[in-house]
Image (cartoon, rainbow, N blue to C red):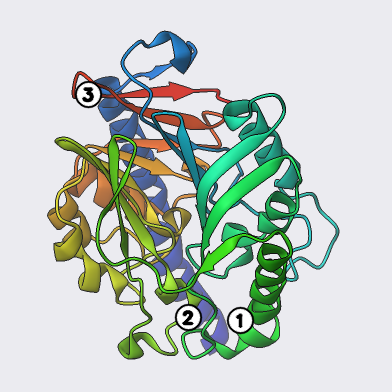
Amino acid sequence: MKKKRAKKIATWIIVPFMAAIFILDIITVELCNYYCKRYPVSTQSVETAGDGDDRIHFLNTANSDAILIESNGMFALVDSGEGDSNPRRKLEYEGYEQEVVDYIIKTVGKGGKAQLEFVLGTHCHYDHIGAYHAIITNENIDIKKAYFKGYDERIGKDYETEKWMLGEIYAQIEQDIHARGIELVSALPTEPFEFGDFTLQFYNTVNNEALYGKGENAASVGVKVTKGALSAFLAADITASTGLEDLLADKIGDVDLLKIGHHGYYGSSSMSFLDVLKPEIAVVTNQLGKIYPNVKWNLTMSAKCPIYATYDNNGLIALFGDSGEISLFGNIH
């Protein structure tokens, strides 16, 4: 009798709670769609825009990161997307190695050869660096410099080291870099540096002892991209739950575009973080429907910010125009 009563009480609590979350999720999606009118996504080719060639390409690699920065004919890759051999996957599956390689060669390549000024691995999770093996070993892609601050097992959880094989993943990439004769930079630059018309700055370049044991996401390197008065922040897997948002927010300052941390999952895009960055545009490397309701709530209700999903738009390009405006282009693959 007591068990039945407990089940009923639990049902009375859980069902209304889930219904409320569902209703709030619908409201936030509708608000997001309304806000998206400010920055409509063009279906035309970015090449016809005629407003410069300073762009950030957000590739569609499902819920993984692969971001190509372009300025004045120079290209750099921030994360690689998920590869085809993730040790976390129990069943065989296809990652996005070939899609990313093909996009690089198509977009960057001249005569079938592509040159990247640098690649950056933001942290050692496979959905961020897993396809680098395929990219680095591809003879049609030349890379001048590779920024990887390395894997520090003191940051991660035990299961990340033991089951997710982060150390082995990093060791393979390091081996690939040396085999191709690419310059490996583990001491990341702390000062801003020029990249065409962009100025780039890395954040969280040195692992903080205060973040030991918080999980590999706490090792995430963020990248601020600035052109004149316009700026974007690529937040890798930076979250409030690891403490990184609080540590970095004031250093980052205002931005126009935010690449949402951790694919819009738990712990990212806190109200306090958004209050400092004040983004006008949010891009998520995921499907809109997979973003956690509280993240959508914070972005739409607190920041009043539209959210653009790479999966739903089949990739996105943010053009930082010479006229001082950001324009969005979809269906880039």
Residue 317, relative to residue 20: is it above or below? Answer: above
Which residue carries the number 1 mark?
160
Image quadrant for the C terminus?
top right
Q: Residue at x 32, y 34 (%)?
A: 32
Q: Residue at x 70, y 82 (%)?
A: 163
Task: Name the spot of residue 196 as percent of width and height, x first.
Answer: 34, 36
Q: Are marks 2 and 3 in contact (CB under 8 Å)?
A: no
Question: Distance between the Cα atoms at labels 1 and 2?
Answer: 8 Å
**Label 1: few (<14), some or many (≥20) within 10 Å?**
some
Residue 98, relative to residue 169: is it above or below? Answer: above
Task: Give amino acid for label 2.
Answer: Gly
Q: Using residue 115 as the reference point, say whether residue 168 is left or right of it.
A: right
Which residue carries the number 2 mark?
215
Question: Which numbered disc, 1 or 2, marks the residue that appears first in the sequence?
Answer: 1
Which residue carries the number 3 mark?
325
Does any portion of residue 66 appear in the rendered image? yes
Q: Using residue 50 as the reference point, say whether residue 229 is left or right of it.
A: left
Tell me the mark number nearer the camera, choosing from 2 and 3: 3
Task: Name the spot of residue 120 as percent of width and height, x first.
Answer: 50, 58
Question: For numbered disc 2, what is the local secondary structure?
Answer: loop
Q: Using residue 20 as the reference point, say whether residue 310 is left or right of it.
A: right
Question: Which numbered disc, 3 or 1, marks the residue that appears first in the sequence?
Answer: 1
Task: Name the spot of residue 201 as percent of width and height, x first.
Answer: 29, 56
Does any portion of residue 64 appear in the rendered image? no
Tell me the mark number nearer the camera, choosing from 3 and 1: 3
**Label 3: few (<14), some or many (≥20) within 10 Å?**
few
Question: For numbered disc 1, what is the local secondary structure?
Answer: helix
Question: Which numbered disc, 2 or 3, marks the residue that appears first in the sequence?
Answer: 2
Task: Give amino acid for label 3.
Answer: Glu
